[in-house]
Amino acid sequence: MTDLIKVAEVNEIEEGTMMQVEVDGELVCLAKVDGVVCALSDNCTHIGGPLNEGELEGYEVTCPWHGAQFDVRTGKVLCGPARQDVPTYPVKVEGESVFISLPNEE
Ligand code: FES
């Protein structure tokens, strides 16, 4: 079981934009597309670029440092130079609150 952690209010994230939150020392990028909030690691798997500062077009985020692209829903790499997918986190919206769950640390 993982705990749900409140990270934001739905209205804090504007449609088509991203924002960074810190959860348990992890930097997480929240993206809102078509009213749906997605959560993924804010560290690009290339060399750690801050994805929340990149461009969001539809569900594709482009890293601001070297242009790798990822799908914010799945974390899948769409375009290099990154080769590894970024981790994503389950999101739950209850009322106006956005919760995510981080994987348990072993
Ligand atoms: S750090 Fe993201 S593409 Fe290089």
Image (spheres, helix red, strand yellow):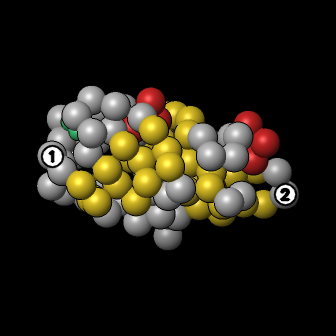
The reply, left or right, for residue 6 in relation to residue 90 is right
Instruction: Name the residue: 69% across, 46% down.
Output: 15
Q: Do the residues labelled 1 and 2 touch (CB within 8 Å)?
A: no
Disc 2, SS: loop
- Can residue 10 be seen in the rendering of this structure? yes
Residue furthest bottom as drawn: 1
Mark nearer the N terminus (1 vs 2): 1
Disc 1, SS: loop
Q: Quadrant of the C terminus?
A: bottom left
Residue identified by numbered label 1: 81
The reply, left or right, for residue 15 in relation to residue 64 is right
In the image, the residue with mark 1 has its CB under 8 Å from the nearest atom of ligand 1: yes
The image position of residue 5, as x and y in percent, is 60, 50
Give the image quarter of residue 50. Answer: top left
The image position of residue 20, as x and y in percent, is 52, 34
Crowdedness of circle 2 by 10 Å Cα count: few (<14), some, many (20+)? few
Disc 1 to disc 2, C-alpha distance: 39 Å
Instruction: Name the residue: 62% across, 46% down.
Output: 16
Q: Quadrant of ligand 1?
A: top left
Q: Which of the two marks, 1 or 2, is nearer to us in this view?
A: 1
Frontmost residue, 77 versus 101: 77
Residue identified by numbered label 2: 95
Q: What residue type is labelled 2?
A: Gly
